[in-house]
Image (cartoon, grey):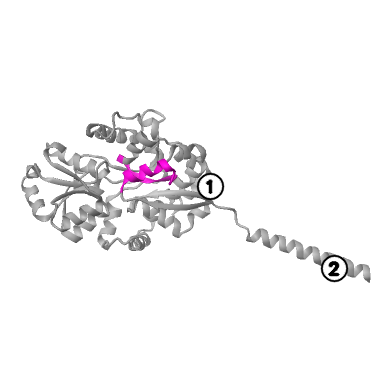
Amino acid sequence: MKLKKSLVSILGATFFAASMVGSVYAQAKPALTEIKVSYQPALYWALPFFVATEKNWWGELGLKPEFSTFPAGVPQIAASASKSWDVGGTGSVPAVLGYVRFGIKTIGLSNDESAGNALLATPKAAEAFAANPQSIKGQTIVLTGNSTGDYAVQSCLKKYGMSKSDVVIKNMGQGEIISAMSSGNADFGGLWAPNIYTLEEKAGAKVICSGKDGGAFVPGALIVRGDYAKENPQNVAKFLAIYLRAWKWMNANKPQAIAMMKKFYEQGGVTISEASMKKEFDTRPTYDLAAELKIMDNSKGPSQVDGWFNAIAAFMQSTGAIQAVPPANEYITDEFVKMVNADKKLREFANNTK
């Protein structure tokens, strides 16, 4: 009896210990890897990150994002020098500047924002411009220098046979431009969405020419610090997969995506109408994994993206922002989009619409 009792006790204790160990393993979660993500508070970068956070997609791939926001691309890329961020989204103009100054790489496109960067005018000035585009000569245009908005404005001037020297350029942040034009202290401004919609709704401003109207292709860029890409390629591929999934889901679930957008903008203190939110989706084509692979492919020579960025770099050289046009293959790479496609888990994750 004593032997039987002893065995029962031993077995019971063993079972209890095993169950405790099993419980510990069941409760233990793999440690998440921190990744520092930078962006500007605009739909095409920030909203995918917001959606991914709301749906815990970062955690699914073992990442823990730490976000930092910037009012424009120039201060954003400058912050890379202190390694305050690892990956992010920015405009194509600061992406080029980021490579020249800080070795930043472009790993994909966020969207086609050609129609989302534009030259706007107050109602009276817009009327005069419509009657005679040359009426803008000698006028002051407020814009954010070395930005996609700047690129769009200069493309518009070129369309009408003018250049920067035919107008007075005043450098301002986007918030300052909205204030200046709303208060009657400026008649013309270069802005990007959603600031365009805010100014339209607050001051009745009109888009008199977009980058698209001016013949400019203005892509948004997904970027990474060069040193981070070398040291953490798998994290970069995961970041890209998360971004691609967010847009895949949003394009397949627009009513829910617009609700998410409203929540995102409200949390950021941005007032935007539902009509403008819908316009954001309509005017900004985005790229899924298959499209990224196609436009980034440089296996048979320069890719489409290479060509677009070469044109942007040439514009920047003409304005004195950079001394020479950097070879596109030095800073634009399809390495990480190919990594996503080659990894079954990441490929399926990036293409998931649920």
Q: Secondary structure at mark 2?
A: helix
Picture coordinates of residue 316 (x, y %)? 26, 35
Q: Secondary structure at mark 1?
A: helix
Compared with 78, 302 (above or below) is: above
What amino acid type should be assigned to the residue bearing mark 1?
A: Lys
Closer to us: mark 1 or mark 2?
2
Whole-angstrom CA distance, mark 1 to mark 2, is 46 Å
Is 89 displayed left or right of 169 in the figure? right
Query: Along the polypeptide, which appears first: circle 1 or circle 2?
Result: 2
Is 227 displayed left or right of 322 in the figure? right
Q: Which residues are magenta?
A: 72-93
Compared with 10, 252 (above or below) is: above
Residue 139 colored in magenta in the image: no
Q: Which residue is mark 2?
A: 9
Give the quadrant of residue 2: bottom right
Picture coordinates of residue 298 (x, y %)? 39, 31
Label 2 neighbour load within 10 Å: few <14, some 14-19, many 20+: few
Task: Please indicate, yes or no, whether residue 163 appears anywhere in the rendered image.
Answer: no
Residue 73 colored in magenta in the image: yes
Q: Which residue is mark 1?
A: 345
Q: Residue at x 43, y 36 (%)?
A: 334
Label 1 neighbour load within 10 Å: few <14, some 14-19, many 20+: few
Task: Please indicate, yes or no, whether residue 64 appears anywhere in the rendered image.
Answer: yes
Q: Identify the disc placed on residue 305.
A: none
Picture coordinates of residue 55 (x, y %)? 46, 59
Viewport quadrant of the C terminus: bottom left
